[in-house]
Image (cartoon, rainbow, N blue to C red):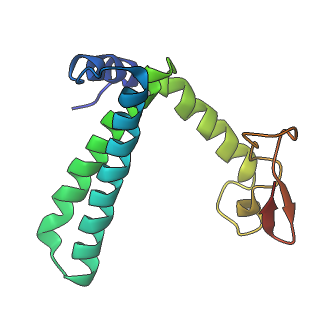
Amino acid sequence: MSVNIKEYQETCKMTAKKCENDKLEICNWGLGLAGEAGDVVSCIKKVVFHENEMIKDGIRENVGDMMWYTAMICNFYDWSLDEILGENLEKLEKRYASGGFSLKEAQRKGTMKKWSGTDSEVKIVGGVENG
């Protein structure tokens, strides 16, 4: 089944538990996302180190659950997940202008915004993000 991202984001709203206040709501979505990410990591560990190939479906299911929590975070802030994905693609196209991964391009020079403070982007000093 293929899904329209905008429709998915709207449908997620109908399946969400209501919280007492905004602070609890965003904590629920953020902590839920972190929990599902932990489940993905746990499943990957079991596939790789326990050689349990049957758990692969758990990775897939938990990635879906992560997307649900991601959509709910976007809904909380009234952000379009579709637009966020588009912005991310634009950033990646700028970062990897050669068309593929390279260590030099992965340094994020000029493609990573600083979220706080006065500078608009993070500066790379000696191969390390500074700012």
Q: Position of residue 36 (x, y in %)?
A: 30, 50
Residue at screen point 75% across, 39% down: 116
Answer with the quarter of the image where residue 127 lies.
Answer: bottom right
Answer with the quarter of the image where residue 24 lies.
Answer: top left
Q: Position of residue 15 (x, y in %)?
A: 20, 22
Image vertical order of residue 68 relative to residue 127, above or below: above
| Quarter of the N terminus within the rendering | top left
Image vertical order of residue 2 relative to residue 94, above or below: above
In this view of the protein, which residue sits in the foreground, 61 or 117?
117
- In the drawing, does residue 88 fall left or right of residue 29? right
In this view of the protein, which residue sits in the foreground, 67 or 103?
67
Image vertical order of residue 27 relative to residue 52, above or below: above
- In the drawing, does residue 20 fall left or right of residue 117? left
Residue at screen point 75% across, 62% down: 107
**What is the total number of numbered labels drawn onto the structure image?**
0
Q: Position of residue 27 (x, y in %)?
A: 39, 36
Q: Position of residue 109 (x, y in %)?
A: 82, 55
In this view of the protein, which residue sits in the foreground, 21 or 36?
21
- In the drawing, does residue 33 fall left or right of residue 97? left
Residue at screen point 68% across, 54% down: 99
| Quarter of the C terminus within the rendering | bottom right
The outermost residue toward the left is 54
